């Protein structure tokens, strides 16, 4: 397979450089702190900037600059925190900032290639036959280079294969790096393991919901709805049903309609209940279609 590097060239047609590094004072001749290719490598050495005064006019207001620093020399765990959740288009945009960022983000751009091949093998696209073993191998290679998107896909395959611990482990890595899909999947999986851990599950579902993940918002509302006793909060439950419904989640539209219909967590309103029931019905929700049809028949 012929592989192409991105970007294809470091110079324009007129011979001028397209990328230039924003160097600080003096450029290092070698990369002393180049991190391991493994994104989960535990860096024992941290880069400590050397500060040097550039003005002697005032002892209380000295100006400082960094010596011997280069963006590409940031520890990989720092870069991972910044860019692990990026899509290919995001990585391309950030890589265009300067050559050093382009170099530093190369492992994550490579992970996008493995992610694409993983999806091809999983779904049988791009002229290849479905092969779950090759799909998982590709996703794991992408995950090893730091992509949370690949971590989530690998975790999902593990979960479907019945390897729940491996799946949860990858979901957790993606969740801790701030990926909303990883946080959502981790929360849902923690509700389905034996024994379930609803407290931690709700914690991760809250994080994903706050980031705007509509499936997480719906699952969070379901989890809150199942709580009984003094800790039950129907207003909070209805709020997340509404958020997910406004985000286009069909099941949440149906449940929002029910909340308006009986006044559970929301002010009772048959008009708004009918509005959300119709929206769910228009998007193919079978129960909503049945109940909306009954309301039209009895009108």
Image (cartoon, rainbow, N blue to C red):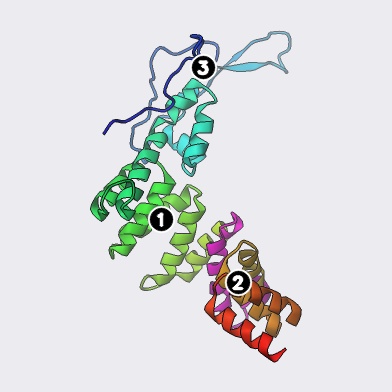
Q: Main secondary structure of the magenta part?
A: helix
- The reply to whether discs 1 and 2 touch (Cβ–Cβ < 8 Å) is no
Q: Which residues are magenta?
A: 209-237
Write the residue at 51% across / 49% down.
178
**Label 1 Cα crowd, 10 Å radius (few <14 / some 14-19 / many 20+):** many
Q: Residue 248: horizontal and vertical position, in percent?
A: 60, 63
| Residue drawn at point x = 57 percent, y = 64 percent | 217
Residue 260 seen in this snapshot: yes
Label 1 vs 3, first from the N-terminus: 3
271 sits left or right of 6 in the view: right
Q: Which residue is mark 1?
A: 171
Q: CA distance from mark 1 to mark 3?
A: 38 Å
Q: Quadrant of residue 45?
A: top left
Q: Quadrant of the C terminus?
A: bottom right
Q: Which residue is mark 2?
A: 282
Q: Position of residue 73 (x, y in %)?
A: 45, 25
């Amino acid at each position: 397979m012929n592989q192409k590097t991105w970007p294809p060239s470091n110079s324009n047609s007129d011979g001028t450089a397209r990328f230039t590094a924003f160097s600080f004072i003096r450029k290092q001749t070698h990369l002393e702190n180049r991190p391991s290719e493994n994104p989960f490598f535990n860096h024992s050495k941290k880069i400590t900037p050397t500060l040097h005064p550039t003005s002697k006019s005032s002892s209380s207001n000295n100006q400082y600059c960094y010596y011997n620093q280069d963006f590409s020399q940031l520890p990989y765990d720092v870069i991972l925190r910044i860019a692990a959740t990026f899509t290919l288009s995001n990585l391309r945009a950030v890589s265009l900032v300067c050559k050093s960022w382009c170099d530093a983000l190369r492992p994550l751009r490579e992970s996008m290639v493995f992610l694409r091949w993983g999806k091809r093998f999983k779904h049988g696209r791009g002229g290849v036959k479905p092969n779950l073993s090759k799909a998982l191998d590709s996703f794991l290679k992408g995950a090893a280079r730091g992509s949370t998107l690949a971590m989530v896909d690998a975790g999902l395959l593990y979960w479907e294969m019945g390897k729940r611990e491996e799946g949860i482990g990858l979901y957790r890595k993606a969740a801790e790096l701030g990926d909303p899909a990883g946080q959502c999947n981790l929360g849902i999986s923690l509700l389905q393991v034996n024994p379930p851990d609803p407290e931690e599950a709700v914690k991760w579902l809250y994080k994903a919901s706050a980031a705007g993940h509509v499936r997480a918002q719906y699952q969070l509302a379901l989890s809150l709805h199942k709580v009984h006793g003094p800790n039950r909060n129907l207003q909070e439950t209805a709020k997340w049903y509404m958020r997910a419904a406004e985000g286009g989640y069909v099941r949440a539209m149906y449940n929002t309609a029910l909340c308006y219909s009986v006044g559970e967590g929301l002010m009772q309103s048959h008009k708004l209940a009918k509005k959300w029931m119709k929206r769910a019905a228009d998007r193919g929700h079978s129960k909503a279609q049945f109940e909306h049809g009954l309301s039209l028949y009895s009108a």
